[in-house]
Amino acid sequence: MAELLRPWGHLRYRVLGDPTAPRLLYVHGSGSSLANVEPMLDRWAERFRLLAFDHRGMGDSDVPTEPYTMADVADDVVALLDAVGWSWFRMFGISYGGMVAQHVAAMIPARVERLVLACTSSGGAGGSSYPLHELHDLPETERRRVLPTILDTRFTPAFLATDARARAIVEARTEGGTPVDPVALRLQMGARRAHDAYDALDRITCPTLVAVGATDGIAPPENGRRIAERLSDATIATFDGGHLFILQDRTATPTLQTFLAADHAVDE
């Protein structure tokens, strides 16, 4: 992985795909890293020139020692874009990454050509996502009990007992992934907890697709609708599934990719 030195440490990132394809910045969710989404990155790199990075303290990026804000994370993103020479780009933010993407798009609106905000919330008057910092503070047994129904409100014990695919999704979320440094996770949850981009949404001018899962218990669909109402050029798309609707609804990825690839000039 390449690296960018920031005041708090090294931000590590990857650039994949055809240099002539549309430039797409992928911003992943909280408590995870690029290693957790490797197959997804490869699939998106087939269609885009993909820039993806590990958030502060996640994956291969250094663990910061001081608290930070969502604006600080957005500064990391802008510094990365400048470092790789991307004057303009498309952006796909998912969950916590969608929160970061809101701040970035409001900070540098003229550089963002198209935007997808998936399973996310604006905070403030637009509504907040489930307080994951509270979930992480729970004992392990209680966390395992609560997690399924916030991932997807249909995932009751009775539902999981009869649906093997749903069980596999929950098991992957609870058992899979690389270990996360507890200090890094606490700092990230602190930034997420204070997220509020609602009043800045009207600065975002690019075509935006707000993608929601119909049964998402972490970022309720209503929060997505409030984001769309606040934007000047937004479309909302509802998919079958919860917070992981991209894994649950096979139409999701093609729909998002088609939107993000639209109006691409090869000489970009």
Image (tube, rainbow, N blue to C red):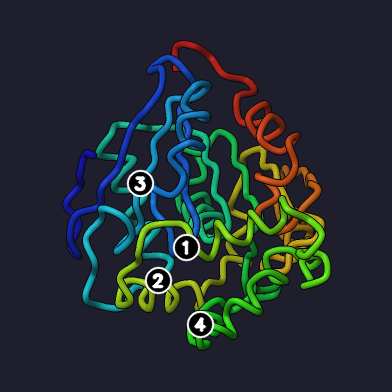
Amino acid type at image mark 1 = Ser
C-beta proximity under 8 Å, tags 4 and 2? no
Q: CA distance from mark 3 to mark 2?
A: 15 Å
For disc 4, the marked residue is 140
User: First in sequence: mark 4 or mark 2?
Assistant: 4
134 left or right of 236? left
182 left or right of 168? left
Q: Residue furthest top?
A: 266
Q: Position of residue 63 (x, y in %)?
A: 24, 66
Q: CA distance from mark 4 to mark 2?
A: 20 Å
Residue 201 visible in the displayed image: yes
For disc 3, the marked residue is 53
Amino acid type at image mark 3 = Phe
Q: Position of residue 55 (x, y in %)?
A: 35, 57
> Is the residue marked by circle 1 packed among few (<14), some (14-19), or many (20+) residues within 10 Å?
some
Q: CA distance from mark 3 to mark 4?
A: 29 Å
The N terminus, quarter of image? top left
C-beta proximity under 8 Å, tags 1 and 2? yes
For disc 2, the marked residue is 188
Q: Position of residue 187 (x, y in %)?
A: 36, 76
- The mark found on residue 223 in the picture is none
